[in-house]
Amino acid sequence: MVLCRSVNLRRRHAPSAAMPIANSQLQLVLRRPGTFIWNTLKAFRANQGLLLAGAVAYYALLSIVPLLILIVIFLSHFVDQTAMLHTMSRYVEWLMPGQSRPIVLELGNFLLHRDVVGPVLLVTMLFFSSLAFTVLENALSVIFLHRVAGRRRHFLISALLPYCFILFLGLGSLLTAVVAGGLQAMGQESLEILGRSWSLGRFSGVLLYFLGLGGEICVLTAVYLVMPVGRLSIRHAFIGGVTAALLWEITRHILVWYFATLSQASVVYGSLTTAILVLLSLEMGATLLLLGAQVIAEYERLGSDDAGVAKSESGTR
């Protein structure tokens, strides 16, 4: 009878012992943020994060123009061309600071001659658009090696995953273009209160900024949620998405300031300046994207360590 009672007590306390394991990860990070950041950077360096980011950036440079062309062709069936290019300019600037103008001009020129796009060219652009996602999946498999070692992904899923992301980006761009168009139209209006007129332009600009930031976090969270092998909790993916997005916001403003004041790239590279600066922006963006993944991997390691400690404590009891 005493033995049965002790077994029941253990079963009763098992959920309460498991609940602090999830909370202890956050508590440990908040208690020692410097240690967590240092361990994350050490693991990122051990995984050759900068080398992986260089590979992702190179293939992203090959994929970015075909991907944007496909998105523009898709959006042109639903959104006015001028409004669409204006919205694309805003968010391409978000991705490649200071270099959106020549890219959007090329997209506009392509739209003028889109009738020449045949099936072969369309399939070619679709293939090159998928290269960046394929390389990104391989890079994330290095960071999440503990997942790959325990479970393999079927090669058909890996082959179809980039095209699913292209479709996801196309639908997300359509939604963003519609919402951004409405916010821009609202910015041209004014609000009259007690005989005074208040322009909604500034309020519209703030909403457009948060629309871009929210879209960026959603895309990054989706990447972290789907690209790594195995099931990842939405909470962990969201932590990585917010981390990478906030770091990119800081980096983006630094790049805008640097390109506008100190950069002498046009003197050194001449006609190759745009390609070099786009590659630099993609390199830094890829680094932060993989660093966000490393934050998730380190956060998972804390959880596995806590689970191991809890199991050993229950075993000694």
Image (spheres, grey):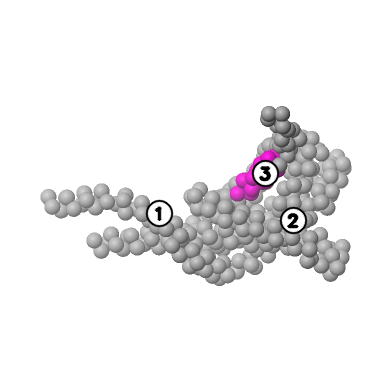
Residue at the image position 60 percent from the left and 69 percent from the top: 48
Specify which label sits upstream in the sequence, 2 or 1. Answer: 1
SS at circle 3: helix
Residue 67, horizontal then vertical, whole percent: 73, 49
Tell me, yes or no, if residue 181 can be seen here. no
Residue wearing tag 3: 206
Query: In the picture, residue 28 is in which quadrant?
Result: bottom left
Q: What main secondary structure does the magenta stretch of the protein show? A: helix
- Dot 1 crowding, Cα within 10 Å, few <14, some 14–19, many 20+: few
What amino acid type should be assigned to the residue bearing mark 2?
Pro
Residue wearing tag 1: 23
What amino acid type should be assigned to the residue bearing mark 3?
Val
* Circle number at residue 105: none
Residue 26, horizontal then vertical, whole percent: 44, 57
- Marks 1, 3: nearer the viewer: 3
Left or right side of 32 for 189: right
Tell me, yes or no, if residue 203 can be seen here. yes
- Seen as rendered, the residue at the extreme left is 1
SS at circle 1: helix
Nearest the viewer among 285 and 142 is 285
Question: Alpha-carbon distance for marks 3 and 2?
Answer: 19 Å
Residue wearing tag 2: 97
Specify which label sits upstream in the sequence, 3 or 2. Answer: 2
Residue at the image position 42 percent from the left and 58 percent from the top: 27
Q: Which residues are magenta?
A: 203-217
